[in-house]
Amino acid sequence: MTEKDPLVIFTPSGRRGRVPRGTPVLTAARQLGVDLDSVCGGRGICSKCQVTPGVGEFPKHGVTVSEGALSPWNAVEARYDEKRGLASGRRLGCQAQILSDVVIDVPPESQVHRQVVRKAAAERVIEMDPATRLLLIEVAEPDMHEPSGDLQRLAKALAESWQVTLGEVPLPVLAKLQTVLRAGNWQVTCALHQPDDGPARLLDLWPGYEEGPLYGLAIDLGSTTMAAHLCDLASGAVIASAGLMNPQIRFGEDLMSRVSYAMMNPGGAAEMTAAVRAALDRLALETAGEAKIDAGRIVETVFVCNPVMHHLLLGIDPMELGQAPFALATSDALSLAARELGLTEIHPEARAYVLPCIAGHVGADAAAVALAEAPGKRDDLTLVIDVGTNAEILLGNRNRVLACSSPTGPAFEGAQISSGQRAAPGAIERIEIDPESKEPRFRVIGCDLWSDDPGFSAATAVTGITGICGSGIIEAVAEMRMAGLLDASGLIGSAEQTGTPRAEPDGRTHAYLVHDGTPDGGPRITVTQGDIRAIQLAKSALYAGARLLMDEMGVDQVDRVVLAGAFGAHISPKHAMVLGMIPDVPLEAVTSAGNAAGTGARIALLNRAARREIETEVRKITKVETAIEPRFQEHFVAANALPHATDPFPNLAKIAPLPQVSFNSGGGDGGGRRRRRRV
Amino acid sequence: MTEKDPLVIFTPSGRRGRVPRGTPVLTAARQLGVDLDSVCGGRGICSKCQVTPGVGEFPKHGVTVSEGALSPWNAVEARYDEKRGLASGRRLGCQAQILSDVVIDVPPESQVHRQVVRKAAAERVIEMDPATRLLLIEVAEPDMHEPSGDLQRLAKALAESWQVTLGEVPLPVLAKLQTVLRAGNWQVTCALHQPDDGPARLLDLWPGYEEGPLYGLAIDLGSTTMAAHLCDLASGAVIASAGLMNPQIRFGEDLMSRVSYAMMNPGGAAEMTAAVRAALDRLALETAGEAKIDAGRIVETVFVCNPVMHHLLLGIDPMELGQAPFALATSDALSLAARELGLTEIHPEARAYVLPCIAGHVGADAAAVALAEAPGKRDDLTLVIDVGTNAEILLGNRNRVLACSSPTGPAFEGAQISSGQRAAPGAIERIEIDPESKEPRFRVIGCDLWSDDPGFSAATAVTGITGICGSGIIEAVAEMRMAGLLDASGLIGSAEQTGTPRAEPDGRTHAYLVHDGTPDGGPRITVTQGDIRAIQLAKSALYAGARLLMDEMGVDQVDRVVLAGAFGAHISPKHAMVLGMIPDVPLEAVTSAGNAAGTGARIALLNRAARREIETEVRKITKVETAIEPRFQEHFVAANALPHATDPFPNLAKIAPLPQVSFNSGGGDGGGRRRRRRV
């Protein structure tokens, strides 16, 4: 390289250098370490290396680019443009040669490690580096005098063209190798699965150039719901999502009851394994159908789930997880064939990656939350709460991360609530109660109007008003407390005590009437004393878990609270603080992370380094076992009040002054009923 | 270690050294690099480390061993003796401590790398180093405060106790891990498959100490017959053998007709794959039944076969092997799950190893012969001929090894012979023809008497005399030539020309009557002109292949000839030389190696290093392609005569002077019919 050699500057990376006149742009990019994609290795076939050369003055870079800085369009580009179309101003990096100083922009879609912006609030990005990719190679033809297998010549081409060491080749792929090589006239596109720097597995191959794309499924396997995101492994885009009820619910609503089912019924664990695996196939077909793609193009799956679901998915009896010391059969991440997990509708050689578990009660779902929220990468102390039938709780900063799980039960998901229901159209999701009149107004899922807005009845005529979902019940209880319908112990006052006929007698206790739909043939929707107790148990468990981690960390306050989980995304932070579900922090320090476990699964699907990162990270997380910690019980009891009895609430006091009422004069339920649920 | 420390001398290795007083014998053996087995790691459970201490003068070693050189029997040894019996004079190496100078003999069965003497003529030995072994380990119990999976603790124990890195753990094994660990009170015996120095796969595990043994199947998959040897993976002993007809015969007798079947019939290759795989299960069950063992204890299989069988076994269409350039789908050795090859009756996690192929016509069977006979390890020039439907031929010495295959067809196996039959009781296997009287005498399989011995009729009454097997037809043709019944061109003389009524007219040619069984209701057994032609074609192909390799090597003579294959074992070297099947060498330089391919399979089964050895060796073997080599055709034509026309026969002349006769006066078959059969 001399001063006479043309200078090439790549944007946005800013990498620059001089290359001999006539060097193809792709070659220059590789020499300068610029991230420019190519599947065909520079044969002008794949068009992945498209670039946009600039012309004119570039004062920032100190160069002027003349018209003929790159070689004119050649026949390969012309043919490509004719057959598939090349956007205006674009060139194929493998064909355009550098003739004089030039500035070349690499558009995002031409970068191998392009970044995908997450939709979530924090706008974090995922760098694309999936384990499976397509590579076009040219294989040497056989020579009778130098006998070698077709596979050995393919391996040689991979090593020479792409520096990839070929590892396992499944028999069905080997069986079609000869036909495909000859059909493609010795050019083939290989789908290679290379989860780390080791040898790559040949998942499939096609004659000639195969555009793809290939797809991956990120699956969040919850106790109650199973959710899957179908991602394009080239662009990283989520092209379809689907959710299903976990069919294991018929064996038990919560995890402990499923463990019991396995213990009590010979073959029970296998039954549950078969049920969840069958549902995986349905999830795959549903997402593929929604995206209108062939499910056979799904070549990777990533799983996150709690330890019991983890074991049941893998076909391991979860018995040991139901009793101390809660030993996992295996805690490390797993890489295996997806068909071993019963996935029969996707690519037959598709792989499955299961995130590592942190401990017997803190699973791969918590690991995924840790990956997505990364509290260990921040300076401030973050409390991450993933609310579900079981809550996963993380607390930490750059110095240390703690984790536990807490058995909240299904109340937050609308179960065990008298008028409760899952989040679906017709379910009350928001409630306000006027502190003076004690009258409620509410919104239901599927309608943007409040119940006292004109046109509400007409707008909800189809769905009806069918019940209260999880976020609705939390708001209802908090609003009742703020309106003075409920005292700090959780007792609902009588009509006399509260001054509203909506506080109706209900046996020896009272219930609050939210909505009477009987004139229209609908249900009477009330919040009963039993509902309050169920919410108290759930929120006490949640808070006690968080408080236990704070004890372990030696702090009384946290800097931020992140509410994760599909449900966490819908909780009103203010109402959660009124209930005492979460520690007292400034309201603006409470954010929602959406389905963080699902996001973690997606990150692991799209980025190989993230798998190594979380595998290392989970071994550093300190696990706190709520089941055997006496202080958990203490915190649990103390957290029963609304809000709980022990901690000061300086922030809450600013936003929601709570009336000093007490209804503990009569009635049978003194607020002292303590129940514990395990798992 | 000081001069005061006791001296310990191990025999037969002769290793010696001083160890601190009180050192267990097993520990001393390990420190001194003595090959002393142990499965339980010194816990006094497995008894694999039995040794025989000597007492008295050992002038050769310069020591005198006193009575109390080892610690007295301890409780562990006493209990072991009581429960399982300890042979007189034996001690457990892990229990007996060295107190003063001692000479300790390690009996062969206590050596890990003990040597197994092969039954074959050469008495070579196989050093035991199987890929799968049993190891007893003690796994740490789970600790709630240091959560880790049971599998991770098992991996740690394996690394610490045995320096083994745990690799893949199949899901079904993982699924039973927790139960087995607890049933064994945290002691488990692991079956580990470690084909090289890399991580070991956990094939299975049992609570506590599991004696074993585990078994392996060495399978020789021939075009016509499939043979399996069931071996004890601890002792190396062959405990059962079984053979089956290859069920693919119904798709074609020889390989080329099976390739044609695959080409002509959609799904034909898959049909043949299914047929051979089903037969593998029968082979496994048959050997296990014969040995009275549970087939589920068979954890390893090794396959040797020709390229077409290799591809059909793997589920690869062999089409490409039927046409130039005869490209293999894959030539390297393969390691895979045995169930992928359809083996469903053996251990579900059993492994399969398939030896590498040398080229499109020279398969894993030839590689196995190369492993068993190792011509590349000798100074003299050895010609190895594995006779079958296709003959594999190797020629070489320490400098260079050549290989080819030759399409001999099934005549040597008794097929395409008018009175031919497979080797079975009642088949004529040996023949002598008196040169004067032209009268034959013969022996049949299943009877030690000659046909002119008293009592022969009675002894063969049950089997009858049913036909001529492959070795019988070779002797018959050679004897006919030596007795002057046949001229050098292969023509049978008439009764007039030969002076015996046994030379009967047979259409326009003649046939020689070996035995007329019609008075007893049996067949008339003759050797027809067509039979002679079939044998001529087969032997010409065989010789032409050998001669082609000699040309390539630039030699006119070889030092040794090894006849391999089940059939090769029964050929009389003298008769083979009379026919001109093999080059002229001193008679004593012709040896039989028995089923060398099967032996090669057994070596690869029992010794891991042998697998690496043959994988390296096959890449060094020079492949000669008979199908495209014009000289093959020349040699083939020239080799048609009995013996062939070109080479001198100094050795043959000494043992079998051949009459100068010629019957080429009349008749339609002038001996010039040339047919070629491919593959």
Image (tube, coloured by chain):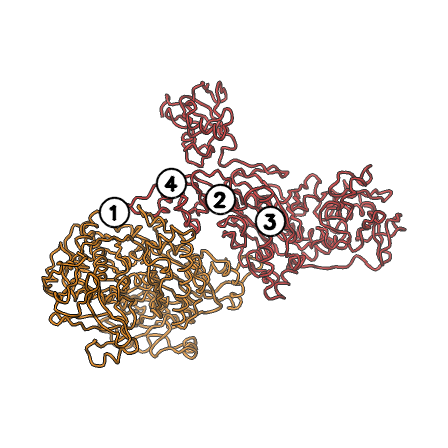
Chain colours: A orange, B red
Q: Is there CB contact under 8 Å for labels 3 and 4?
A: no
How far apart are the alpha carbons under marks 3 and 2?
A: 22 Å
Q: Is A334 situated left or right of B211 in this image?
A: left
Q: Few, some or many C-alpha atoms within 10 Å of disc 3 (few <14, some 14-19, many ≥20)? A: many
Helix, strand or loop at mark 2: loop
Give the mark nearer the N terminus: 2 vs 4: 2
Residue under label 1: A628
Q: Amino acid at mark 1?
A: Ile
Report the front residue among A31 and A315. A315
Give the mark nearer the N terminus: 3 vs 2: 2
Q: Amino acid at mark 3?
A: Leu
Helix, strand or loop at mark 3: helix
Report the front residue among A105 and A643. A643
Q: Badge 4 sits on which subunit? A: B
Residue under label 4: B186
Residue displayed at 78% across by 45% down: B464
Task: Report whether mark 3 lies on the same chain as mark 2.
Answer: yes
Q: Badge 1 sits on which subunit? A: A
The label nearer to you, 2 versus 4, is 4
